[in-house]
Image (cartoon, grey):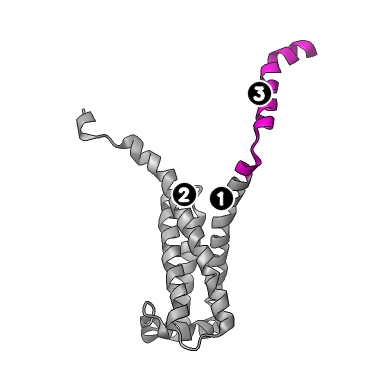
Amino acid sequence: MSTTHFRRSTGRAEAHVKEDCHDLDFAEVDVARGAGAGPLQVVLFFLAFGAAKFTPWEAAAIHPLLVHSPFLFWLPQLFDQQMASNIIGAVEIGLGAMVAARPIAPRLCVIGSYGVAASLVVTLSFLITTPHLDPALSSFIVKDVTLLGVALWSAGEAARAVAPRFVRNWRRPEQAV
């Protein structure tokens, strides 16, 4: 096959590639990058801070938050300080892993993302329920507002990935055979 013939036989593909390059919308690329980076940050936060809960200093740091929490007050009553922190750490690591499973299990990601959102609402409640909260800690907790938004977005995005399967398999009663 000559070069000329090869170019003729692939000329259409080359022209198509050139058109695609000219039509490339960098905003779409940025959206795709952001779509991957947002949930990844939630995953990294939950894995890292979940692992930190297994350390004695983190267990001591979160104990006052737990005691005053209307949602988690029962943990220090049932378990010692370290075990209560370990339970929270295991839940955080589990939720982070569920969100990370998005490429292979979008349904699991939906559940994990809503779990992360609920956990962040509990964390944000510490701002109201903990008396004499250290300003540095309250500033640190405020970042959870952003993570909450990303978790809810992640849940919606993963749910959209799951929804077409339900729509394809669902029939209206009048369409049933």
The numbered mark, 2 or 1, whose residue comes first in the sequence reads 1
Residue that mark 2 sits on: 157
Q: Residues within 10 Å of mark 1 (few under 14, many from 20)?
A: some
Camera-side residue of 47 and 30: 30
Q: Residue at x 52, y 71 (%)?
A: 50
Residue 16 is tagged as 3
Q: State the image coordinates of residue 4 (x, y, percent, origin top left).
A: 78, 11
- C-alpha span from label 2 to label 1: 9 Å
| Quadrant holding the N terminus | top right
Residue that mark 1 sits on: 35
| Picture layout, residue 30 above or below residue 38 | above
Q: State the image coordinates of residue 170 (x, y, percent, origin top left).
A: 29, 37
The numbered mark, 2 or 3, whose residue comes first in the sequence reads 3
Secondary element under disc 3, as helix, strand or loop, is helix
The numbered mark, 1 or 3, whose residue comes first in the sequence reads 3
| Picture layout, residue 100 above or below residue 132 | above
Camera-side residue of 158 and 89: 158
Q: Amino acid at mark 3?
A: His
